[in-house]
Image (cartoon, rainbow, N blue to C red):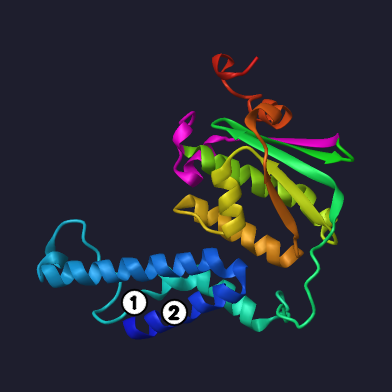
Amino acid sequence: SVDTARTAVGKATRVAQVVPEAAPFVASLWAALTATERERYQNWVSQNQAARPGFRRHAPPGRVACSRFAYAASWFLALLDSKMFPLRRLVQAEAHREPQLGPGHLEFDASPWGGGAVYFLAGKPVSWMKAVWDPEIYNRFQATPGDPAFQTLWEFFTLLLACELWAPRHAALACCVKGDNTGALQDALRLKGRGSLNHIAREFAWRRAAYAWELDFVHLPSELNVRADALSRLHAPLESRKE
């Protein structure tokens, strides 16, 4: 029922205050609930709404479509099961010691055509990666090739790929993640985002919890992020590449 859905989403919101990795999944639950409330309002405004072309009722009156909540709800079931995510007491009487930063850090950057990242040890680049946005990826994110409006999405996606590649190797120590896009860094820190950004946030949150990542996010000025920027533009049109 709608009342049960509201109660469940409210409780999930309180869980996210204790388990930060739950935040993007809570956002998905709220989106599902908001869509249901919007349909209820439209139906109340016009009792003939169901007869209009293109209208589709997803559930009977007073009920919600469970499929809308299923993806995010499955994460909460895994959390409550505590097999994949053992719950720990984080509030203790003794002072919490911040994890020591390891000797390495990663730098990332993205363009509308691809992403790039470099891993450093003791200040020297030792490994690199590049990604190309192909038609399948553009369709997945409903993005337009070459459109700068999707810049933060590409940056956040590249950040996820770079952490997937290098962060698990340093789970015992904090890994420093540097980038020049403040939006992507903020989304990774808050584990939130709108639309496709929230999809990436869910994947990032899932991995951060499963791999016990300890990450420190640092803004790197664009003029210093030259290596990752060059990698992200390897497949850009010639006129769009930087000298």
The answer to which image quadrant residue 77 occupies is bottom right
From what the image shows, is residue 54 above or below residue 223? below
Q: Earlier in the sequence, mark 2 or mark 1?
A: 2
Given residues 200 and 63, the one toward you in this image is 200
The residue located at (23%, 72%) in the rendering is 40
Magenta includes 62? no
User: Could you say where residue 87 lies in the image, as x and y percent from the top left?
Assistant: 70, 80
Q: Residues within 10 Å of mark 2 (few under 14, many from 20)?
A: some
Q: Is residue 57 visible?
A: no
User: Could you say where residue 123 lies in the image, as x and y percent from the top left?
Assistant: 86, 37
Residue placed under numbered mark 1 in the picture = 64
User: Could you say where residue 152 lies in the image, as x and y percent from the top left?
Assistant: 53, 41
User: Could you say where residue 164 lies in the image, as x and y percent from the top left?
Assistant: 73, 51
Given residues 164 and 177, the one toward you in this image is 177
Task: Report the span colored magenta.
Answer: 124-149
Label 2 and label 1: CA atoms lie apart by: 15 Å
Secondary structure at badge 2 equals: helix
Q: How many marks?
A: 2
The residue located at (25%, 64%) in the rendering is 56
Residue placed under numbered mark 2 in the picture = 10
The residue located at (65%, 49%) in the rendering is 160
Locate the N terminus by quadrant.
bottom left
Determine whether, in the image, residue 214 is placed left or right of residue 205: right
Q: Is residue 12 visible?
A: yes
Q: Nearer the viewer, mark 2 or mark 1?
A: 2
Given residues 52 and 110, the one toward you in this image is 110
Secondary structure at badge 1 equals: loop
Amino acid, disc 2: Gly
The residue located at (84%, 46%) in the rendering is 104
Locate the C terminus by quadrant.
top right
Amino acid, disc 1: Val
Q: Which mark is residue 186?
A: none
